[in-house]
Image (cartoon, helix red, strand yellow):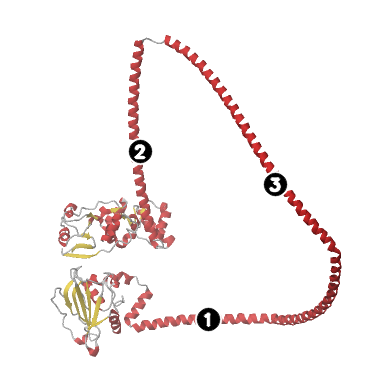
Amino acid sequence: RSQRDGERISMDEAKEDDYRKGAICRIKMHNFLTYTDAECCPGPKLNIVVGPNGTGKSSVVCAICLCLGGSHKSLDRAEKYRDFVKKGMDEGFVEVELYRAGGNGQNLLVRMDISSNNDKAQWSINGASTSRKAVKETMAQLSIQVDNLCCFLAQDRVVQFASLDPYKLLHETEKAVRPQLFEQHQRLINQKKDEKTLRSQTDQLKSNLDQATEQKNGLEEDVRRMREREETKNKIDLLKKKRLWVDVSQKKTRVKQLKEELGKAEADYKKLRAVQEPLRNKVSDLEENIGHLKQSINHRDSQQKSLARKCAGVVDTMQHQEQAVDSEYELIDEIDERAETLKRRREAKEIEIVQLKRDIANLPRQNEVKASYHEAIKEFKSIINRRKKINEAKQAINHRKRTLETTIMKKRRQLDTVKDYKIVRLEKARGSQHYRIYKWVEKNRDRFRGNIYGPLFVEVKVRNALHGKYVEAALGQTLFQYFCDEKETWAQFPKALAKETGMKVSVLHVKPENPPKVCDINQLKKHGVTGWLEDVVECDEKVLWGLRGMGKFHAIAITDRRLPPEAVAACMKSRRGDPQGTQKLFNVDEKFEVKFSRYGGHTSSSNSKLWGARNLLMDDNSQDSKKTRRGS
């Protein structure tokens, strides 16, 4: 038994011999979570902490775990050590005294100091500063395992304990009974694996030996043939060498013959050289004459090219003169055509003058002309008025057309946005079971009656990160829930999915409902409340039915800015049936909740931290969303 705010109430007196070595005999907490100052002395046997929700039962468990070297992350209660300091305080500490766990049979005092200014914790044993690692080693020597779920089970880790498979549960139980038992079990498992490996290697070696024996027997004949081949090859090499000697002797004889023939050829060449000398002189004279002839031919060619250029110039001049003559002829023809055209026009004008004289003679009198003129003016004005009305109607139609085109473009952008945020969220879940279930639903949607909605993190859209935080806090793990509006589909859909894919899914049958009014929201808005949570959610109407029934979105009040404590207190219900308040309020990064006992009418209140949105705003790139993220 313990009491807050400094007053100490000890446990019933017990004999010291009843305590076991390492048993907790005293716990002291200062500015820790909900406690200001509290100290309790557990008994040597079973100890039970009793109290309503939010009174600090779990805080005692957290104090024991953290002080004895446990990790704050394993508690699933806070992300940093400074979150365990009581709100509004700068520092706090926890002391745990262990019975006769120190040297010379003295009690061991372990202390942990935490500060709200940083995320570090400091430990000490019997007043001497130490590290968390040293504390864990000391606890291991005393067989105290705060990280073992079989020895120390915090409230927030019950689900994790229930999900342990039989093998993991056996390992944790062995550690709890005796750590050496777990090590021996692991050695037995490793030796069993080594035994299987050695047996497999032995069988493989036997198989290799049998194969090698068979291969040896099959290669003996090949060895005999190889030896015969080697002997034959040696004989061939010897014969090749003998053949080379024979070739060398033949080549030597041939060389002698060629030398004799060469001598004879040189003598004949000298004789022919002496005979051809006069002919060579004549050839050189002829080549000199040929050179002179080529020069004279080149000179004549240059003269011919010069004459050709002059002729080409004369030809060009003649062509230009011919073109000028042709132009003159064309100009003469054009003048003749113009003269003919003017003549025809003159004749036509003369005929027109005669016709006009006849028309003037047949014209009506002046009064008839004026009457016709006024009628024509009236008809002209009527036409102008009709044209003006037609133009006005046309402008109205064009304006309506532009308005409709703008509306269509906005709707298309909204549709694209809806498609984009669904695609982005599904891409983030790619590879997970939720992604595979969604793909199966899209492929087989036509097989079921009515509509299937889900998962919720795809169907629900919010305006900013703060609202996303609120929605995820209200739904929790039900973000992956599916809804359907037909009871037949509610029964068939999960069975078909499990049968074809082996995957399971939670499905809720939604019905139209009008939830009762909690309180007047305008009264809450006077204290700074923004509205109800359902007001900031964009989703299908039937999905909203499910959110009201499952998450009570119609009864959760929210704020867009942090409210002071007095405003929060004014917004919460004070008793069951109070029409002026709400039982649950989300205030930026805190959740406030009031509960009433069903039988005794007792009131219990609690507040906890709200964590940031993880699934609902990964597609939102608006400026408002970015500002809200930075603010939260």
Name the element at disc 2: helix
Dot 1 crowding, Cα within 10 Å, few <14, some 14–19, many 20+? few
Q: In which quarter of the image is residue 519?
A: bottom left
| Image coordinates for residue 362, horizontal then vertical, percent | 42, 9
Q: At 59% from the left edge and 82% from the top edge, which residue is drawn?
A: 209
Residue 593 sits above or below residue 215 on the image: above
Location of mark 3 (residue):
302
Q: What residue type is labelled 1?
A: Gln
Q: Which amino acid does label 3 sit on?
A: Ser
- How far apart in space, not on screen, are marks 2 and 3 (Cα)? 83 Å
Can residue 451 be seen from the camera position used here?
A: no
Q: In which quarter of the image is residue 183?
A: bottom left
Dot 2 crowding, Cα within 10 Å, few <14, some 14–19, many 20+? few
Residue depth check, mark 3 versus mark 1: number of the one nearer the observer: 3
Q: What residue type is labelled 2?
A: Lys
Please state which of residues 557 and 527 is positioned toward the viewer in this rendering.
527
Location of mark 2 (residue):
401
Q: Upstream in the sequence, badge 2 or badge 1?
A: 1
| Image coordinates for residue 525, horizontal then vertical, percent | 18, 54
Residue 487 sits above or below residue 147 on the image: above
Q: Is residue 252 left or right of residue 128?
A: right
Q: At 69% from the left edge and 44% from the top edge, which residue is drawn?
A: 305
- How far apart in space, not on screen, are marks 3 and 1 (Cα)? 100 Å
Residues marked 3 and 1 touching at CB (< 8 Å): no
